[in-house]
Image (cartoon, helix red, strand yellow):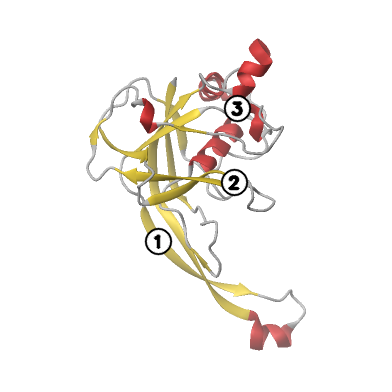
Amino acid sequence: MITVRVQAPYASFRRSYARSFAESYPFAPPATVYGMLLSLVGERSRARHVGVRLAFAYARQPAVATTLRKLSRYKYGVATKQEKLGNAPDFVETLCGLDFLCWIDSSGEVGAARHGAAVARLEERVERAVLSPETVTRSGIVCLGLSDDAVDAVTLVRRPEGRWRSLVPDEAGEVELPTWVDHVGSLDTRWRRFHFDAEPKESAPSPPPEHFVAIEDPRPGRRG
């Protein structure tokens, strides 16, 4: 198991059913963090490291900013329609000042178990990517969510210090976040409920097992 600290100035995690008002999830969804880690190590297959377990703790609850943008409905060259009917308000929520710890436990990875020593586990690949980034081939920069939500830093943490607020899986929790996203439809999208600690606590080197959420691929025949 390893721990990484992820810091980003801003990011937007649009809710699955958001429409004209682009509401954001209040925290980075596990599915999004998993995708960011795959990007960090240069992995293109989402199924490669399914079975990995992730746990999260935040330095603070991210602040929410709402941006009002002008949305143009018509392409350039339709000036008359654009002037009268084309402009519409577009509200977008953005989280500001994201700073969280992510514990990565690869002991249950399906891909690693299936391919044996031929495939390094995700925690090993993340550690190598952080310590030797020149060895990783990827497309573009590492982002948290949208392609313009660049990550400031991903650093290895040998022993967490300070006080953090945990995001804990809880069937009665007030926060619902996707753990797997179906990018074609919605059939295979999966959610889990979480609660966010009201008060910060000294972080332990390893969270208890119930703080982890497993990344599982619900698609048949696509497990690793």
What's the residue type where badge 1 is placed? Ala
Crowd tier of the residue under label 2, counting other residues whose Cα lies within 10 Å: few below 14, some 14–19, many 20 or above: some
Q: Is residue 36 above or below residue 13?
A: above
Q: Which quadrant of the structure image shows residue 78?
A: bottom right
Gap between marks 1 and 2, in whole Å? 24 Å
Q: Earlier in the sequence, mark 3 or mark 2?
A: 3
Mark 1, secondary structure of its residue:
strand
Q: Upstream in the sequence, badge 1 or badge 3? A: 3
* Horizontal side of residue 92 vs 56, given as left or right: right
Within 10 Å of the Cα at label 3, are there few (<14), some (14-19), or many (20+) other Cα atoms? many
Per the image, the residue denoted by label 2 is 181
Q: Quadrant of the N terminus?
A: top left
Mark 1 or mark 2: whose residue is earlier in sequence:
1
Labels 1, 3: front one: 3
Q: Which mark is residue 122?
A: none
Mark 1–mark 3 distance (CA, rounded to whole Å): 33 Å
x and y, in percent, of residue 57 in the image: 35, 36
In the figure, is residue 210 to the left or right of 123? left
Name the residue located 55 percent from the left edge and 56 percent from the top edge.
Answer: 16
Give the distance between the C-alpha atoms of the residues marked 3 and 2, in whole angstroms.
15 Å
Q: In the image, what residue type sits under mark 2?
A: Val
| Circle 2 SS class | loop
In the foreground, 32 or 153: 32
Image position, residue 184 (x, y; %): 69, 51
Q: How many marks?
A: 3
x, y percentage for residue 223? 66, 29
**Residue wearing tag 3:** 49
Residue matched to label 1: 65
On screen, 163 above or below 206? below
Kindly identify the residue that appears in the image at 53 percent across and 63 percent down: 18
- Say which residue appears at 27% left-offset and 27% top-offset: 161
**Residue 33 in view in this figure:** yes
